[in-house]
Image (tube, rainbow, N blue to C red):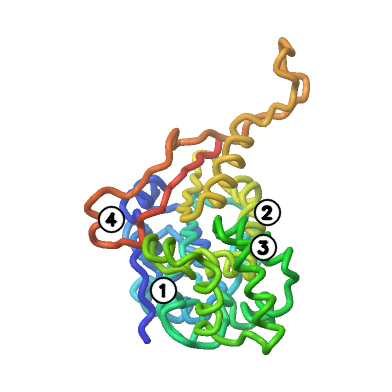
Amino acid sequence: MEFKHISVLLNETIDSLNIKPDGIYVDGTLGGGGHSLEICKRLGDGGRLIGIDQDEDAIEAATKRLSDYKDKVTVVHSNYNNIKSVLNNLGIDKVDGIVLDLGVSSYQLDNPERGFTYREDVPLDMRMDKKSSMTAADIVNDYSEMELFRVIKDYGEEQFAKNIAKHIVKARQEKPIETTGELNEIIKAAIPAKIREHGGHPSKKTYQAIRIELNNELEVLENSLDTMIELLAPKGRLSIITFHSLEDRIVKNIFRKNMNPCTCPPDFPVCVCGKKPTGKIVTRKPIVPGDEELADNKRAKSSKLRVFERI
């Protein structure tokens, strides 16, 4: 199966980076290389792109796609959480821009072998990094009812999280839950028929929640953003596309904290904590896709772009 992924908010994201021909840029979620290709087109002889991804299929597809620019591209198999050590190993201490597209690729969602899909009956997997030992099946079969409830409620924002967790625990007492088909039936039974008639596939939110938990997606994001801002050269930009309200909240809050880090009580006449801003938020409101993009790509629906510029 070909690695396909339509880059969301592509032009807006590339424009937001203010690309300099001789700059150094990092694509922390390389995927199929859509954003990276557009960055490379704007780089001159002195420019450089570092692409990072934890998915070997993505690495292979992007390397092929960027082959015309191989002299200025370095592709690294890692998680963007390790961006500082990746750049250190390449002898780079500052970069002019970093982009993150936090969406799951169409290839990962649609390829049955990867076990992300609720549309086919396949083994439960959902690992972004296939070298990781833990799979979605481990979460479904080993987490307590309380832990499952927390994951499905917090990360899936699923109103029937409690009932779904209860049904999962009950079903696995008979036998381990091994496939997406088995999990679909359990989730379906936990959601009232009236609700199932509207609002898309009943498994969608639960699968999203399990995927986020398994791949530590929110934790990795929260732990990486300050480091990324620190790695930016003056006027360097960090552009992040989120697809989930919790991701967007993390990005918004960390950008705010970096723009206004003062911890002094509001009634203090002057700042005495000494914490100085590291930069400014470029996007007062997040940039969202227009009608044309939404018509072409329904997966762009919940995407939001936020941009931060280093002082």
On screen, 77 above or below 155? below
Quadrant of residue 6 in the image?
Answer: bottom left
SS at mark 3 in the image: helix
Give the alpha-carbon distance from disc 1 to disc 4, as whole Å. Answer: 32 Å
Residue 223, numbered circle: 2
Residue 70, numbered circle: 1
The three-letter code of the residue at mark 1 reads Lys
* Nearer-N-terminus badge (4/2): 2
Residue 209: x %, y % from top left? 58, 64
From the viewer's perspective, is the residue at label 1 or at label 3 nearer? 3
The three-letter code of the residue at mark 3 reads Phe
Residue marked by disc 4: 294
* Nearer-N-terminus badge (1/3): 1
Residue marked by disc 3: 149
Residue contact at pointers 3 and 2, CB within 8 angstroms? no
Give the alpha-carbon distance from disc 1 to disc 2, as whole Å. Answer: 31 Å
* Nearer-N-terminus badge (1/2): 1
From the viewer's perspective, is the residue at label 1 or at label 4 nearer? 4
On screen, 187 above or below 93? below
SS at mark 2 in the image: helix
Q: Is residue 132 visible to us here?
A: no
How many residues crowd around disc 3 within 10 Å: few (fewer than 14), some, or many (20 or more)? many
Which residue appears at 41% of the width and 79% of the height?
A: 119
* Nearer-N-terminus badge (4/3): 3
